[in-house]
Image (cartoon, rainbow, N blue to C red):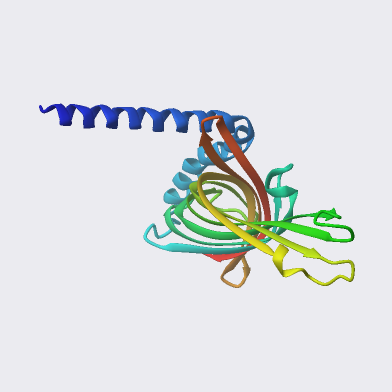
């Protein structure tokens, strides 16, 4: 083995160790917030095999090669001071493979506007000049998601857990006005910053099968956590979504 090969192997070992440590720190930081949600999902998962066995005994099993789809829309809101403490609307679309009567695994894409806040500064560039700075955040996300549900019920509880990538867009819009309210071009600035972070989502929902003919109606509440691992440790950005859903399975 050459000396260069030894160096490369050592660097790879260091990189793997750093990645494992970062993931471990992120999971530890999120454990407190995730625990009650994950317990609810696990309870539904434990109930799943019992439901599946009952259906197989009666010959009433789902076609495990079929697919399910879902679209949701509703309210997205930052938690605490994250993302400026704003709120707005959010949407999600998902496609899932039905693995059993109680379990679906698929992919989701979503968009959330989280609003923002406005700062106003007086006499900052001279007497009578007012500067307004507007911050806004939005999130585009894609994730692998598992859905666990009760197989046969007129009101079907659902547990949701997923992991993916969250692209955060920050818009910083600055504009200054003279005493007559006219915009001053030299003080007009627009900065847009985009970052991609790993994230997780955990949620609970309820579905009404065949509520609209062959379509299923439902409602969901989810927590979304974004991890940012840096020299200072693990930072998190949190927001929640409350949505109404329509889908097929």
Q: Please determine whether, in this image, residue 240 is positioned above or below residue 229.
A: below
Residue 70, above or below 103: below
- Residue occupying the far left of the picture: 1
Comparing 94 with 194, the one in front is: 194
In the rendered view, tell whether residue 27 sits above or below residue 183: above
Residue pictured at 49% horizontal, 41% vertical: 50
**The furthest residue to the front:** 126
**Identity of the residue drawn at 16% across and 31% down:** 5
Apparent side of residue 248 relative to residue 13 in the rendered image (left or right):
right
Q: Is residue 129 left or right of residue 237?
A: right
Locate residue 123, reporting x and y percent.
86, 55
Q: Nearer the viewer, residue 48 or 203?
A: 203
Q: Position of residue 200 (x, y in %)?
A: 54, 44
Residue 130 appears in view? yes
Q: Quadrant of residue 234?
A: top right
Q: Is residue 249 visible in this depiction of the protein?
A: no
Name the residue located 79 percent from the left edge and 59 percent from the top edge.
132
Number of marks: 0
> Which image quarter: residue 4?
top left
Residue depicted at x 78% and y 63%: 176
> Residue 229's x, y, as percent?
51, 35
Q: Nearer the viewer, residue 198 or 44?
A: 198
Reply above or below: 194 against 181: above
Residue 186 image offset from top left, x and y in percent:
70, 66
Considering the image in quadrants, where does the N terminus appear? top left
């Amino acid at each position: 083995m050459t000396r260069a090969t030894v160096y490369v192997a050592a660097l790879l070992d260091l990189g793997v160790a750093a990645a494992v440590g970062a993931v471990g720190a992120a999971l530890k930081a999120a454990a407190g917030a995730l625990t009650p949600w994950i317990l609810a999902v696990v309870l539904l998962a434990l109930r799943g095999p019992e439901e599946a066995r009952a259906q197989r005994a009666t010959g009433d099993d789902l076609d495990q090669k079929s697919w399910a789809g879902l679209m949701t829309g509703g309210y997205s809101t930052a938690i605490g001071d994250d993302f400026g403490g704003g709120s707005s609307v959010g949407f999600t679309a998902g496609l899932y493979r039905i693995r059993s009567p109680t379990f679906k695994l698929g992919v989701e894409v979503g968009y959330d506007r989280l609003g923002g806040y406005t700062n106003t500064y007086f006499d900052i560039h001279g007497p009578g000049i007012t500067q307004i700075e507007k911050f806004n955040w939005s999130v585009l996300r894609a994730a692998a998601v598992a859905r666990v549900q009760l197989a046969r019920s007129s009101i079907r509880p659902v547990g949701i857990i997923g992991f993916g990538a969250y692209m955060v867009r920050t818009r910083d819009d600055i504009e200054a006005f003279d005493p007559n309210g006219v915009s001053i071009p030299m003080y007009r600035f627009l900065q847009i910053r985009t970052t991609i972070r790993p994230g997780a989502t955990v949620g609970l929902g309820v579905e009404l099968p065949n509520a609209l003919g062959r379509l299923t109606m439902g409602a969901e509440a989810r927590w979304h956590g974004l991890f940012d691992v840096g020299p200072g440790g693990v930072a998190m950005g949190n927001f929640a979504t409350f949505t109404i859903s329509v889908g097929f399975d």
